[in-house]
Image: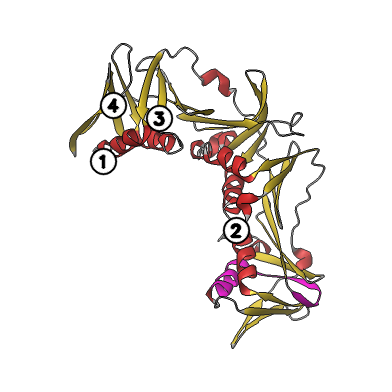
Amino acid sequence: MKLTIERDALLRALSHVQSVVERRNTIPILSNVMLKAEDGRLALSATDMDLEIVARVGGQSASPGATTAPAHTLYDIVRKLRDGAQIELESTGDKGQMTLRSGRSTFTLSCLPPEDYPLMSAGDLGHSFTVSSADLKRLIDRTRFAISTEETRYYLNGIYVHAARTNEVPMLRAVATDGHRLARMEIPLPEGAAGMPGVIVPRKTVNELRKLLDADGAAEQDIAIALSDTKIRFVMGETVLNSKLIDGTFPDYDRVIPTGNDKVLEIENKLFAEAVDRVSTISRAVKLSIERGSLTLSATSPESGTASEELEVRYNAAPLEIGFNARYLLDITGQIEGEGARFNLADAASPAVVRDAADGSALYVLMPMRV
């Protein structure tokens, strides 16, 4: 293999694929990135056996071929080369090495045989549709903070994506929960998604996908999605992400969304979030004391002392005191883009429903805590 490529293009592709590679691997080949030169283009692949990213970039190929090189080492080398530099990659399979030249710099990396590199077979992905980059970002951003990190309930370690109906309108819905809070976001159902199975997209896949959506040029792209019961694929221009899905049953989340919360609290979201942040300096447990037209936030800690702050709010129901985890409150208020947030409450022991007052596509459920 021999190929010349621009440093910036190679760095961009490497930044996409190398983040999939785990720092510690019991299988040496999984520490490497696969490089395949063909028809003047370079394809870079990395996998952890559950997730695979393939990125293609243009170059000047003198001779086709393939090799695998240490992913993080190669990325660090290319990152430290000067902007605009030309890089020449050359490998001879018989020596198990790849030489990288740029200007007066030369690096020789140990390689492993490309035929040993594991490739993920996509299988039959029977359902396919297209989602705009902006909509996919919203589905991810409004829900991923609620993904559980508790490995014993592995079926909560991702975002549940499925077709649903809201007021008889077909929607594509994303849901995540860790048992303490639940986040639900939906967009109009894309054409072709009507018969899709409900799937759980793993947390690592969600995070890698979100990085790709922030890459240069991704903001204007439509994302092609194809899936089956066990695999999902996202295609963004020259980059493809393939992933296994979590094999489990997501709980019936509708049962935990209260429908009878009749006490309505309307607040200015930014002022509320800033007040929660200040008061939680004393304690993560924050008490909301709500009366007609006013809200008092307070926190108490035997070690640190006390804090309280009063806000003007819109509230016309009976007085109520309820406690929440401040970090969970801030996670939710951080996703509200409008000026106002609406809390639907029942009593001190029942979960609250939170919405963006200006956007009904997202819904959050937050369990109270004793304060």
Residue denoted by label 2? 216
Q: Where does the image place residue 276, in percent across and percent down from the top left?
A: 30, 35
Check whether the beta carbons of the residues at disc 3 and disc 1 lie within 8 A of each other. no
Which mark is in front, 3 or 1?
3
Give amino acid for label 4.
Lys
Which mark is in front, 2 or 4?
2
Question: Residue at coordinates 28% horizontally, 35% vertically from top-left?
Answer: 275
Q: Where does the image place residue 56, in percent across and percent down from the top left?
A: 72, 63
Q: Which quadrant is home to the N terminus?
A: bottom right
Q: Where does the image place residue 270, in percent across and percent down from the top left?
A: 35, 36
Separation of marks 2 and 4 at Cα, in angstroms: 43 Å
In the displayed structure, 344 sits above or below 111; it is above
Residue denoted by label 4? 287
Residue 97 is drawn in which quadrant?
bottom right
Q: How is the image coloured?
A: secondary structure
**Label 2's element?**
loop
Which mark is in front, 4 or 3?
3
**In this view of the protein, can residue 368 be seen by the observer?**
yes
